[in-house]
Image (cartoon, rainbow, N blue to C red):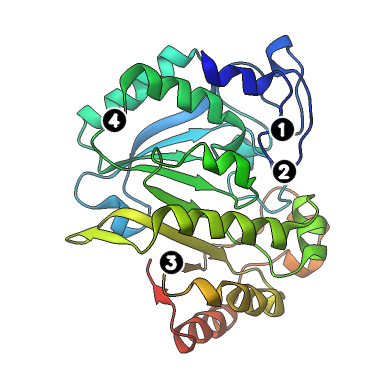
């Protein structure tokens, strides 16, 4: 199992915890030497270009390398609710989603469990449907290079245009430069988006969740993304609502106002981004 050695001194993500997960040590993500999965199903609530007709074959991995205080899926990402399984079980889950007619296999929060994904793919081979890397954007270029020729669609978040906000709300340093370098590598691998009909088969789809009282950060995100606008799809998201520990931060302890969302969406359109939802 050639990819499992990556866990012996885990430096898969930019946190570079350096723990030996094979011996039961756990770093920031809180996941050890086996896959930890919350659920897997045909998801019809993702972007329309992913859902298509058959649904996105989504696998929600437990744990996360980010510590977002407002996480909308905190039970999975922060509390790590899920079942520890074997790599062979993960391979069977992937095969089952293919047989059910999924348009793609959508790995949600995969970064810290990447060795398990790669080992499972060694067992079943690369499916004939696209593989989606649905991540928080806080990625190492060296790790992404392992995915060249494996992943068909990168779907990173680009959460902040301000490193201070990233540290405050997600507990990570250097977010913007790290996310930019990761995005550059994703675009290098994929080039421009490729569709069959209305279904995305290859490319980079960037998500940005607009936060209350943080329009300046959202506008900075658009500026950072502008050099890539001819190569990426962009989903400006309005789904924010206060969850998890958001109550400790008064400025984000409310739902997003529609005029806040409209301001960011309008700016993205004016800048010439290709907007999808």
Q: Which is more toward the observer, 257 or 184? A: 184
| Secondary element type, mark 1 | loop
Check whether the beta carbons of the residues at disc 4 and disc 2 lie within 8 A of each other. Answer: no
Distance, label 4 to label 2, CA atoms, is 31 Å
Q: Say if 86 sits above or below 70 in the image.
A: above
Q: In this view, does 131 lie to the left or right of 243?
A: left
| Secondary element type, mark 4 | helix
> Badge 4: how crowded within 10 Å, few (<14), some, or many (20+)?
many
**Residue 133 visible at all:** yes
Distance, label 4 to label 3, CA atoms, is 27 Å
| Secondary element type, mark 3 | strand
Residue under numbered circle 1: 11
Q: Where is residue 42 in the image (x, y as percent from the top left)?
A: 31, 38
Whichever of labels 4 and 2 marks the residue nearer the N terminus, that label is 2
Residue under numbered circle 4: 97
Q: Residue 232 carries which label?
A: 3
> Badge 1: how crowded within 10 Å, few (<14), some, or many (20+)?
some
Q: Where is residue 26 in the image (x, y as percent from the top left)?
A: 75, 22
Check whether the beta carbons of the residues at disc 3 and disc 2 lie within 8 A of each other. Answer: no
Check whether the beta carbons of the residues at disc 1 and disc 3 lie within 8 A of each other. Answer: no
Residue under numbered circle 2: 14
Please tell me which residue is depicted at 68% across the width and 65% down the height of the picture: 160
Distance, label 1 to label 3, CA atoms, is 28 Å
Distance, label 3 to label 2, CA atoms, is 23 Å
Distance, label 2 to label 1, CA atoms, is 7 Å
């Amino acid at each position: 199992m050639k990819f499992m050695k990556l866990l012996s001194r885990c430096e898969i993500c930019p946190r570079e915890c350096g723990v030996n997960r094979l011996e039961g040590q756990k770093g920031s993500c809180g996941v050890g030497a086996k896959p930890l999965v919350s659920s897997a199903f045909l998801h019809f609530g993702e972007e329309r270009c992913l859902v298509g007709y058959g649904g996105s074959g989504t696998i929600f991995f437990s744990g996360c390398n980010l510590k977002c205080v407002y996480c909308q899926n905190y039970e999975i990402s922060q509390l790590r609710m899920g079942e520890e399984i074997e790599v062979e079980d993960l391979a069977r889950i992937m095969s089952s989603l293919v047989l059910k007619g999924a348009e793609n296999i959508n790995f949600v929060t995969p970064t810290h469990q990447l060795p398990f994904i790669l080992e499972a793919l060694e067992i079943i081979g690369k499916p004939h449907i696209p593989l989606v890397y649905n991540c928080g954007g806080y990625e190492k270029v060296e790790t992404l290079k392992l995915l060249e020729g494996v992943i068909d669609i990168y779907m990173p978040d680009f959460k902040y245009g301000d490193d201070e906000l990233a540290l405050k709300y997600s507990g990570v340093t250097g977010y913007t430069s790290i996310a930019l370098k990761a995005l550059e590598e994703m675009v290098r691998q994929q080039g421009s988006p490729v569709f069959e009909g209305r279904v995305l088969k290859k490319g980079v789809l960037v998500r940005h969740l607009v936060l209350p009282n943080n329009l300046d950060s959202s506008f900075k995100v658009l500026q950072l993304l502008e050099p890539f606008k001819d190569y990426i799809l962009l989903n400006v998201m309005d789904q924010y609502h206060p969850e998890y520990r958001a109550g400790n931060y008064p400025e984000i302890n409310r739902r997003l106002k529609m005029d806040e969302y409209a301001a960011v969406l309008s700016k993205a359109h004016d800048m010439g981004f290709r907007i999808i939802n």
